[in-house]
Amino acid sequence: MNIINRAASILLLLVFFLAFFQNSVHGRPLLLSMSRPKPDDAALFARWLVSQSSWGVLNTIASDMGGAPFGNVVSFSDGLPDKGHGIPYFYLTTLDPTARNALKDQRSSFTISEYAIGTCGKKDPENPSCAKITLVGKLKVVTEDPKETTFAQTALFTKHPEMEGWPKSHDFQIYKLEIEEIFMINWFGGPKPLTVDQYLQAKMDSHTVIA
């Protein structure tokens, strides 16, 4: 009987592992706190995608590479869980090229894929119905407003607790992307028309409609 019970326990663990792996293989496990909005609500969808994501590719201009674009995977946060403001904040050090590039040339873009949050299923990341968004603007150090600095630090450390323990000697600073243009595809038919004002003014709540 003990052997049978042990075998049953192992089988249950195996089933759990396989289910977990299946959900994770196409992105991280589904731990989203807000439902996926309908694709035709461009502003709400964009805010949802940014708020539910935790990392993306931040592109800067590398003057030491002849002005070539330099993309780097970085963590970010736009606010506390379910209370995102839409502006991405980053915790960067000049030991990394991204921060050094931004201090010389603030022109930047930040790209996020829905694939990373696990809601695309088995779709290819390039499939138009697996959303992607690029925010274009200026990457700036947050220093002048103590209130914004506190907000950004809380947002970053809440979503990425490991950051709080990163070496002080590396002189990490908080940066933000001041958005000037938005490019988003979340369905067939090309990019959705979306202004920065529409994006920032979109109202999010935990009861958004599932697509």
Image (cartoon, grey):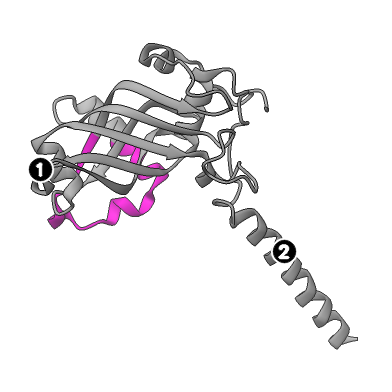
Q: Is residue 211 magenta?
A: no
Is 193 above or below relative to 87? above
| Element class at badge 2 | helix
Q: Is 77 left, or right, of 140 in this rendering?
A: right
* Residue 32 place in picture, x, y as percent: 58, 40
* Residue 41 place in picture, x, y as percent: 57, 17
Image quadrant of residue 150? top left
* Residue 172 place in picture, x, y as percent: 18, 48
Q: Is 88 left, or right, of 186 in this rendering?
A: left
Q: Is residue 1 visible?
A: yes
Label 2: few (<14), some or many (≥20) within 10 Å? Answer: few
Of labels 1 and 2, earlier in sequence is: 2
Task: Give residue 16's mark.
Answer: 2
Q: Amino acid at mark 1?
A: Ser
Is 16 above or below relative to 137? below
Q: Is 58 left, or right, of 202 in this rendering?
A: left
Numbered range of the magenta stretch:
153-175
Task: Give residue 63's mark.
Answer: 1
State the residue at coordinates (52%, 41%). Answer: 126
Q: Is residue 165 magenta?
A: yes
Q: Main secondary structure of the magenta part?
A: helix
| Element class at badge 1 | helix
Q: Is residue 172 visible?
A: no
State the residue at coordinates (59%, 57%). Answer: 25
Query: How many labels, in total?
Result: 2
Q: From the image, which quarter does the N terminus lie in?
A: bottom right
State the residue at coordinates (24%, 33%). Answer: 108
Q: Amino acid at mark 2?
A: Phe
* Residue 117 place in picture, x, y as percent: 53, 44
